Image: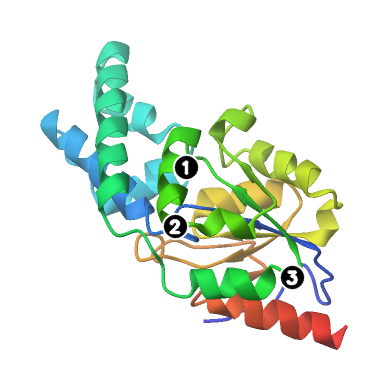
Amino acid sequence: MNSPKTYSDAPNYSAILWDNDGVLVDTERLYFQSTQEVFARAGIDLTVQQYIEYFLMRSSGTSKFATAHGLSEAEIAALQDVRNERYQQLLENEPITISGVRETLMTLRPHFVMGIVTSSRRRHFETIHRRTGLLEFFDFAVTREDYAQSKPAPDSYLAAVARSGFPTGRCLAIEDAPRGLIAARAAALDCWVIPTELTRPATFSGATRVLDRIADVAALLLDANSAS
């Protein structure tokens, strides 16, 4: 599934900026589940394709989808509260590990500055990583409270580049969804995409690479470094 690079023929990356949900942890499906459940209570069917369109292509997916189905602002706010609590419950109890993540991070840690760039609220983010123990591999994390506009706006990645201490050309973004790719490219970053089952039907125009699994990241980056 690897595709040729289109932006960096001979990259010299110093920092890796990782998306969280869907890349480091298997939580995107839980967000979909919790969102689908609360819309079902309101008599609204949220399909996978609609989730990709409203939530993985744009920001403010819940409010936009709900508004499109005639819900009021008060109803949307109540729905979001219920969804967030249900998502929190799922994060605390459901399996969230992705095969190969810990091994990949352990391999890359000595060679790169690494940060997490997520649209998750810090509460959910902290719940996730109390369970994973993955934060030991990272120098920083940028959560939804740390920037103005969520992906696909570039704000989160611009904040992460500043935190990394390196220029944009030395930073690589790793994403799984179209809105993350759009955000990374809007911040002038190279972006490698690892699709999930949810995002696999999407197109990833502008991706520097599209990979099959996270282990490919370490293999490609360390091979590039040894050849440079």
Q: Are marks 2 and 1 in contact (CB under 8 Å)?
A: no
Tell me the residue that label 1 is attached to: 125
Q: Amino acid at mark 3?
A: Pro
**Mark seen at residue 149:** none
Q: Which residue is mark 3?
A: 110
Q: Position of residue 197 (x, y in %)?
A: 35, 66
Q: Is 212 drawn above or below residue 69 in the view shown?
A: below
Distance of label 3 from label 1 (alpha carbons): 24 Å
Q: Is residue 4 visible?
A: no
Number of other residues with Cα within 10 Å of mark 1, as a class: few under 14, some 14 to 19, many 20 or more:
some
Name the residue carrying label 2.
132
Identify the coloring: rainbow
Q: Secondary structure at mark 3?
A: loop
Q: Amino acid at mark 2?
A: Thr
For residue 97, side relative to residue 146 (left or right): left
Mark found first going from the N terminus, 3 or 1: 3
Measuring from the top left, give residue 103's x and y in whole percent: 54, 75
Res. 86 image quadrant: top left
Q: Quadrant of residue 112?
A: bottom right
Using residue 195 as the reference point, say whether residue 182 is left or right of it: right
Mark 2 element type: helix
* Closest to the observer, 14 or 74: 14
x then y, percent, for residue 173: 66, 58
Q: Nearer the viewer, residue 160 or 207?
A: 160
Of marks 2 and 1, the one in the foreground:
2
Q: Residue at x 20, y 34 (%)?
A: 39
49 lies above or below 191:
above
Q: Is residue 49 above or below residue 65?
A: below
Q: Residues within 10 Å of mark 3 (few under 14, many from 20)?
A: few
Mark 2 / mark 1, whichever is N-terminal: 1
Residue at (26%, 40%) from the top-left corner? Answer: 89
Q: Secondary structure at mark 1?
A: helix
